[in-house]
Image (cartoon, rainbow, N blue to C red):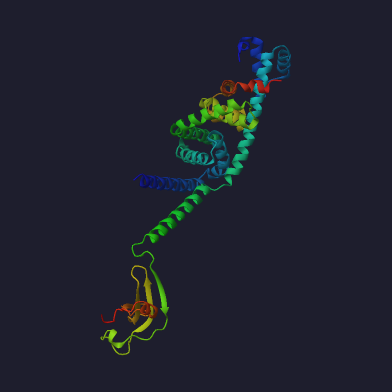
Amino acid sequence: MMETKATVDRQDTRLARASQALYLQEVRQSCGGEQVDLDRGQLVRLAYRFLWNWHDAEDAVQDALVLAEQKRSQLKDQAKWQFWVRRIVIQQSHLQRRRGARWGAVWARLKHQFGARQHQSSGDLGTTELSRIVRELIASLPERQQTALVLRHLEQMEYPSIAAVMQIAESTVRVHARAAREALRKAILKRYPQWAESIDD
Amino acid sequence: MTDEHADNPDCQQTRQTWHDRADGLADRQDVALMQAHLGGCPECRRYVRQMDSLSDTLGHLRAASERELSQTRRRPRHPVWTQARAGAMAAALLLVVGVGLYFSPWRQPGDRVTVVSRHPQPPASQDLPRAEPPGEAPTVRSVVQLRGESARAWMIEQRDSGHPRVHIYKLYPTLPLQGEANESPVGRDTPG
């Protein structure tokens, strides 16, 4: 019974993907199709910065592009199409991550506890290991701080562009980015006190 | 680690300058003031080192994610799992067929077919059915002997069915083979 349900779910997913692909093909034939083709790689890369999984990022971008085209009439200034699509991609990425976090919360907690114990015993925090930890800690930040930090430091976007994507003031973006950096520093120190000693002279 | 210096205005200004510098907003005067403050404040020196390390780590994370992206794009979706699943299904199928053949109900333990004569003499005419139409006389293929629990010699008779690919075979119990006849004087057709 379970297998049959899983098979039906997979078929439904394939049908949904196929219908979305056909819809996007129609979108490409209409105005703005070239923009979609040009930006898709960048959008997947953007979603990947939030999800750290290629397939999840592709799914998020696919959903975001369909959603963006469905609601395109709500966009008053068509010149801001690029920012608008990026904003929807980020929203879909957050949504996808929340879905994954909901189902994998227990596993993530166990993994985090095991990993924390392992790193505390090792005492040495290399650059690669620190990157992995920072990646985990970024995911635990509030969504606005996370968005500002990712767009600024991983996507290397300028603050005016980030403000256009997030639809907030540029100064507010700076506040979020600074708060995110501070939060990351404190989180690393709280989780790995040896980090402070490792970078001292 | 305590952070009591965060309330000091000079320390606050120093930390703000670090963030402005990271965002490309700090001017030379602010940076000079920050450097002067760092000379006498170990707590802010530590703060700046930690923030510099964090900034480097974010750059490393960005480069690492670029590498991961370029590697992931070349990989097909779930290739290992698909191959493993196909291999496991093939192995399971072979296992089921093998076990089924071994415990087949048609297989007698120790039974085997041995062809003892390829071209024996035709059987006696009284042993054959009489209803054969002329011109379609049966052909005696061979005499076989089953050994094991059902040890016996059989004569196989082949008849044409009218279809080029369909043949009718009939089995007739025969006299004991030459060697067996010598071993057991009481044969099937021997009176007594």
> Is there any visible trace of residue A137 in the rendered image?
no
Counting from the top left corner in percent of width and height, residue A14 is at 43, 47
Q: Residue furthest top?
A: B8
Q: What residue is at 42 percent from the left and 59 percent from the top?
A: B98
Which residue is more in the foreground, B4 or A170?
A: B4
Tell me the quadrant of the picture where the C terminus of chain A can be found: top right
Q: Residue furthest bottom?
A: B134
Counting from the top left corner in percent of width and height, residue B37 is at 71, 13
Indicate the quadrant where residue B70 lies: top right
> Is there any visible trace of residue A8 in the rendered image?
yes
**B123 on left or right of A54:** left
Tell me the quadrant of the picture where the N terminus of chain A can be found: top left
Q: Count the labels in the image.
A: 0
Indicate the quadrant where residue B137 lies: bottom left
Counting from the top left corner in percent of width and height, residue B116 is at 41, 78
**B79 on left or right of A126:** left
Residue A48 against residue B53 in the figure, above or below: below
Residue A74 against residue A183 in the figure, above or below: below
